[in-house]
Amino acid sequence: MGLLKKATGGSILSKVLLFGVLPVAVLGGGITGAVALHNNSVKAEALSIIKSEVTITYGTPLTVDLFVEPGADASRCSFASDVSVINTDDLASYELSIISNGYKTKSKLNVVDDVPPTATAVPQKVYVHQLPDPNDCVTDVSDKSAVTVQFAEGVDIGLGGPRMVDVELTDYYGNKTVIPVPFEVIDDHTAPVIEGCQDLTFIVGDTPMFRTGITVTDDYDEHPVLTIDNSQVNMEEVGTYPLIYTAVDECGNMSSVEVTVNVIEEEQAEEVAAGGGTVNYGGGGGNWHKYDNCTNADAYAAASKIYNSICKSSQSDVLRGLKIFYWVNHNIGFALHHTTHASWAAAACQAYGRRYASCYGQWAACKGLLDVAGIPNRKVWRNSGNHIWCLCYLNGGWYHCDSTQYPGAGHTFSYMMTDAEIRKAIGYHKNFNTSSLPPRATVSVQKYINVHKCTVSSGLKLVTPTPTPIPTPDPTDDPAAPTSSSATSQAASTTSASTTTSASTTTEASPTTAPATTAPAEETTAPADPTKAPDPTQKPDPTDTPAPQPDPDPDPGAGGE
């Protein structure tokens, strides 16, 4: 022991003993060996607390304690590498130098995506055996990487009813999330319903509109598909042909309706119309220009025959007016093509004779009948210029009336409506020119009117007296005015500005109850004097001839006027 103290000194020995080194090591290698052993031991201990590889989730703040083993003292550890250049939002791997208790070592840093995707379920309404795209079943998908969406294994919607369907979301790194999606599975075996089909009659060479007036509905599918098979119809040859309407819904349920298409000669058309039939419903063709030269007298003569067959002079103006619009709606089909606008009289004659017209022609047909009935009426233009209808003085007030057949609306039409009501009615009435119109009625009478049954409720208080029939004047060889007794009794209470001669008539008594608006100060065209022959050179009132106005956005199926 004395030799040890001499050779090494007590202080060194005590230090060696302090670090747990056996004295024999000192004796064997001297003091240099003891120090080396000591340093190695310290280094080993310092480096042992540093992890060789660290994996963190993207976005994790980078601190040195992430690299220190749990329970070890990280206070004497620091980064030797410049970690300020590392963005942990980026997925990558880095080799870093770390100092522990003065000793440097290396460690690998992996920034990874181990977060599963997130998403929100989108409830689905589907038919049996018809799985939607799984991507449509979730929304707000969020993840660091690309996500694949698919149905979980074993999904079955072969039976109707509510259920939860699992949708799996897997990102690029294999992280997976399962989102339960509510499904309502519909077991549908009901075919769509096709309505509005009827046998059709066209003139040879016409351009038919087979789709007009046809509606298709389904118990689930909001947009069933309608196809029309006209492959057996030859519009260039007189004959009878089958036309087949077929509707299919989303489930494949199918229904069909077959109708007959009659293609006739021009000469037969007016015979069919005269017999109450409908010719060329929704189409046009043939020699339609032959009506261009029709006069007011021609129009009133044709209107008188129709009026006398549908109205009685003992009826109120409200009921007679309703019968007029009902007749036009049910007997004059809508067409955009092959219709004359040469004058109101030409358009009316074509409507009466061919039984089809644009909205201008349907207005003209109503005007002719209203004039014959002695019901004051005015013309209403839509601001865009592509639709026209009537304003009629009925029951002491001015009301909107429109007979136009709108595709898909069946035989619904507008009668005795206020401004507010006509703007909401079927068709194209929202914006119309009021500058030239008299004040309109504001009190609704719709609850008293049934346009489908052509009836007026007895609950409607009539403020216009029912006309008293008077003898019909003797007709001339070429009558220029209506021949009905009511036309004579009510032809015009005031003289139209556009008529050169007014008929001598008996006007109705003033109503005893205050009308909804003031009585009209001016009528539209009154029938000509029945004692005078029409002037063949007389030109139509320019206000009755539609002025072409380009419409940047015409309504489909409107008048196209």
Image (tube, rainbow, N blue to C red):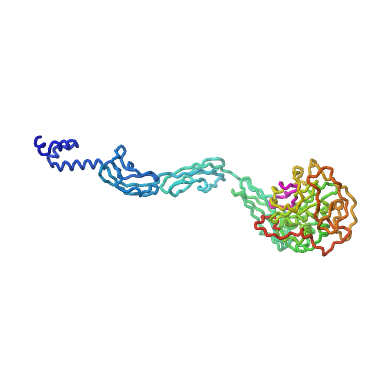
What is the number of callouts on the image?
A: 0
Side of 529 where 137 appears, left or right:
left
The answer to whether residue 344 is above or below residue 20 is: below
What residue do we see at 45% from left, 48% from top? 147
Q: Where is residue 408 in the image (x, y as percent from the top left)?
A: 68, 51
Q: Nearer the viewer, residue 78 or 370?
A: 78
Residue with the most extreme top position: 1
Seen from the viewer's position, the closer of residues 97 and 365 is 97
Residue 542 in which image quadrant:
bottom right
Residue 158 in which image quadrant: top right
- Residue 330 visible in this rendered orientation of the protein: no
Residue 403 included in the magenta stretch of the image: yes
Most extreme residue toward the bottom, as rendered? 537
Residue 24 location, x and y as percent? Answer: 13, 38
The magenta segment is 401-420
Quarter of the image with the C terminus is bottom right
Q: From this viewpoint, is residue 94 visible? A: yes
What x and y, as percent, mark residue 223? 62, 50
